[in-house]
Image (tube, rainbow, N blue to C red):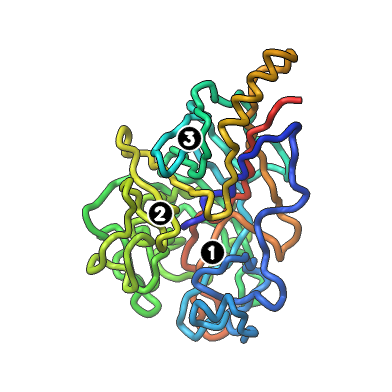
Amino acid sequence: MKIIFTILLYIFVSPAYAEGSIISFCSDQDIGWSTEMKCLTSCGGLRVNRVYTSSDEAAMNGNGGNLSDGSVGFCTGQATTYKNTIHKIEMGNAASGYKCTIFEGTMIVDTGNASAGEILYSGKLKNDSCNSVIYDVLYITQDRKVEYAGFTNYPDGSGKVARTTSYCATDNLSIPANLSWLDVMVGTTYQDSNRCYLRENTNWSTTWKKAASSPTTNDFSSSSNQIVEYDDWKGILTSALDGPPFDLTKAYLTDSEGYFLDGGDDGFGQKLDPSNSDRLIVKIPTSLGDVNLFNGRKLKEHKEIKKNKNYPSGFKLKISKLASKRNFSEEFGVKFYFQRSGTTAKFLGTKNGDPGLYIEAIQPD
């Protein structure tokens, strides 16, 4: 999935937290089922058999926001755990290839139980070696595994609850030479119960973790949310294919640095960390609009001001949670996948969604 988390990396004269969420929830006229929507629709606000007004966004995905009988769609549920482990954050200049490390260490960020505006990490920004260049790319080295847990309502009016389950909850981070780790649905059944990752057919570039050995209508109201491990590298191995179909008859879309491009040529990509195959490096260009990076020249000018006016030492790197659950119609953090069977929703599985992270480089007062 393209959105790992939303990042705004600025220089501020003082800490600043946005009042609302960067995450965009669909308006009433835009809600509907889709294979890839830019806005979020909570599962409790949908019905598998309802006909939704076709919006421009939904129409672009070829289904008008609706599910035909037997087809699959996703919606968002509420994350109660969402854990990323970050090891390095670098800013870069694409033209020159120059990079500057602004964080290095081990940062475990869990947005699942955090409140809006809660600071999840605060530490000195490593910036002494940054040159005076225009930074237009962010590189984040993190664990391949994302850990999440969550719940939502079945989108069929039954009142039943779907939750992350213990089925296929762990991941061994294997790197198969082909897509032998990925199962594909045949109607309402799965081909191989030993494969934990699933998609409806080869026209889907997105894969998710199974919730059970077959599509289920179980009510998980009395269960607890189980932590699921999702390997983001396996996810990119289908979304970077030049499809449809998204299979090995197609080539992988890559850039000059060897990053697998997620869903096109907009520059967002991932590749395995050359020094540790259990980690991957996420590349996010500022042209996507999710990242704003400061100018290294301003940083150096601030150092001179500090010397002359006895300013507090060092920029600060802060990571906070920008959004939280407001009501049943605005859940986020976990994608839930359902198949329509008449008026009934069958629960298929889950995948990590947008955790609502906000990253700042803060200039001291």
Marks 1 and 3, Cα distance to the nearest angstrom? 32 Å
Closer to the chain start, of discs 2 and 1, is 2
Amino acid under disc 1: Phe
Q: Is 237 located above or below residue 281 in the figure?
A: below
**Residue 90 got which mark?**
3
Which is more N-terminal, label 3 or label 1?
Answer: 3
Residue at mark 2: 168
In the rendered view, tell whether residue 106 sits above or below residue 233: above
Answer left or right for 3 relative to 356.
left
Q: Looking at the picture, tell me which residue is in the foreground, 299 or 18.
A: 299
Residue at image location 53% in from the left, 86% down from the top: 342
Q: Residue 263's spot in the image, x, y percent? A: 41, 63
Q: Residue 22's quadrant in the figure?
A: bottom right
Q: Distance between the residues labelled 2 and 1?
A: 15 Å
Helix or strand or loop: what does disc 1 sit on? strand
**Relative image position of residue 73 (x, y in whole percent):** 51, 73
> In front here: 295 or 201?
295
Q: Mark 1 points at which residue?
A: 336
Q: In this view, does 193 lie to the left or right of 71?
A: left
Give the residue at x 52% y 40%. Answer: 135
Give the number of the mark in front: 2 or 1: 1
Q: Which amino acid does label 2 sit on?
A: Cys
Q: Earlier in the sequence, mark 2 or mark 3?
A: 3
Q: CB under 8 Å between callouts 2 and 3?
A: no
User: The C terminus appears in which quarter of the rendering?
Assistant: top right
